[in-house]
Image (cartoon, rainbow, N blue to C red):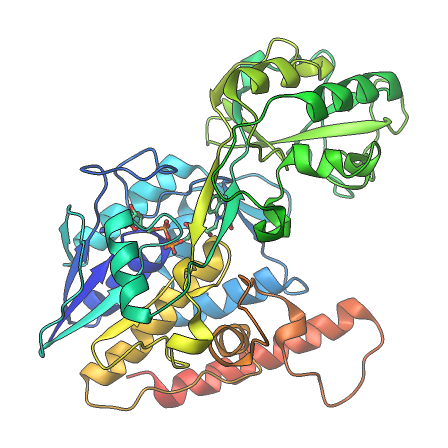
Amino acid sequence: MTVHIVGGGLAGSEAAHYLSSRGHEVFLYEMRPVKMTEVHRTGFLAELVCSNSLKSESLTNAEGLLKAEMKLIGSLILTCADLARIPAGKALAVDRGAFSECVTKSVEDSGVKVIRKEIKELSPKDDEIWIIATGPATSEGLAENIRDMTGGEDFYFFDAVAPIVTKESIDMGKAFFGSRYEESGDYINCPMTEEEYRKFWRELVNAETIPMENFDKKHLFERCMPIEEIARSGENALLFGPLRPTGLIDPKTGERPFAVVQLRRDNKEGTLYNIVGFQTRLRWREQDRVLRKIPCLRNVEIVRYGVMHRNIYINSPKVLDVFMRFNDRIFFAGQITGVEGYVESAMSGLYVAFNVDRILRGKKPVRFPRETMIGALTHYITEDVEGDLRPMYANFGLLKPLERKIKNKLERRKALSERALKALSEFLEKFRS
Ligand SMILES: Cc1cc2nc3c(=O)[nH]c(=O)nc-3n(C[C@H](O)[C@H](O)[C@H](O)COP(=O)(O)OP(=O)(O)OC[C@H]3O[C@@H](n4cnc5c(N)ncnc54)[C@H](O)[C@@H]3O)c2cc1C
């Protein structure tokens, strides 16, 4: 039997590496750089298309628990993230170039045959298993084929990317380093007075956006809401969202600013920063103009503009079983299944690979314990949704409640995480081949 994986993103790379490292013959088809998507910029595997943060590592955070579980299974994505890590407080942020290079090299070194071509149609032979991990930017031809195959409706939503700017173009005379509530000073903060904020807000809500076919706010995933859409919901909306000054004191004044724009380091050298929460569909010239209304960005140089993009996913509860299997020969993994986020997508690659490995060894696939974030999220995506599937990310609400009640939220989350890691260790002991 051979395994054929379509899409060398976070899910596909994770699955390919896992299966190849266990001695299976794996072919990975990645269309870049021969054919690019609207959001990728390089030919590397596992390119991070927007933020360079893989979010929190704390066990009182659902993303932190998910990562801890993936590490127990042996996640390549997290190994490379550790190697490419750059400072970002409690978050796991990476130098995106070093990260993707690490994944590409590790996948190739593990023996996976990486083939650079677009797959337009799926027709697996009897001795082949195919894993479709083509992500939110699945190429048109294949998307059509999948739609026909699954009999699915036109499921999609819109996602947005924030601009990246050069550090040297930020006015550090006005900005200051600091993180909300933490000692570390990893973020650059651009303070604004009330007058500066109001002026910026007016420019933002009146700026020209790129019209998009089928653009409908109800399809926007809330954590990827474009900044101009948040701003349009009220003059103070940004003060409770990405521009909230909470937890930040400007050392020059000793006071909390009226509003703060935060920038997170985007590469190891610290020469590039992305603007936190500034996903946008403003026209590029408007991005230049409006960002310059922020005092410490008045001479800003944007190296990657924000964009919006149609994001495809299938109706998993209807078409997949809990093992992300469409039929005996075809599995799906990654964001196309309706999980949301880099780490969640990588997790689903690992999850599918775990069971494909078992199947190839003549064993039955197994469900992950519902106490684990992996088990709970995959259960939600394939079995638990009421009505239409909306993309879902890791959160403690998905886990079975504890048997004993713990009032304190952090203590409760810690207990949930401990229970999950224990359950996963026992599960792996029993079922990992
Ligand atoms: C614009 C945008 C911004 C996002 N920002 C964030 C963010 O900031 N943080 C976050 O956690 N998540 C973000 N996401 C969500 C999601 O986590 C990422 O999209 C993630 O990369 C999904 O992983 P994946 O492996 O499923 O797909 P991808 O990483 O996109 O990988 C799919 C791969 O398949 C290839 N491919 C597509 N079609 C074919 C074909 N027919 N033949 C061969 N190869 C093909 C593509 O080139 C790509 O390399 C964003 C998504 C989008 C669209």
Which corner quadrant of the image does residue 70 belong to? bottom left
Which corner quadrant of the image does residue 21 belong to? bottom left
Position of 11 compared to 410: left or right?
Answer: left
Position of 122 compared to 49: left or right?
Answer: left
Relative to 283, does residue 27 appear above or below in the rendering?
below
Give 211 or 207, whichever is nearer the viewer: 211
Q: Residue at x 84, y 30 (%)?
A: 249
Give 408 or 324, whichever is nearer the viewer: 324
Residue 422 point in image, percent of width and height: 55, 82
Give 199 or 170, whichever is nearer the viewer: 199
Relative to 370, does residue 408 appear above or below in the rendering?
above
Which corner quadrant of the image does residue 390 belong to? bottom right
Position of 115 compared to 60: left or right?
Answer: left
Residue 261 point in image, percent of width and height: 71, 28
Position of 401 compared to 431: left or right?
Answer: right
Q: Which residue, as the protein is rendered here, is positioned at the far top?
A: 299
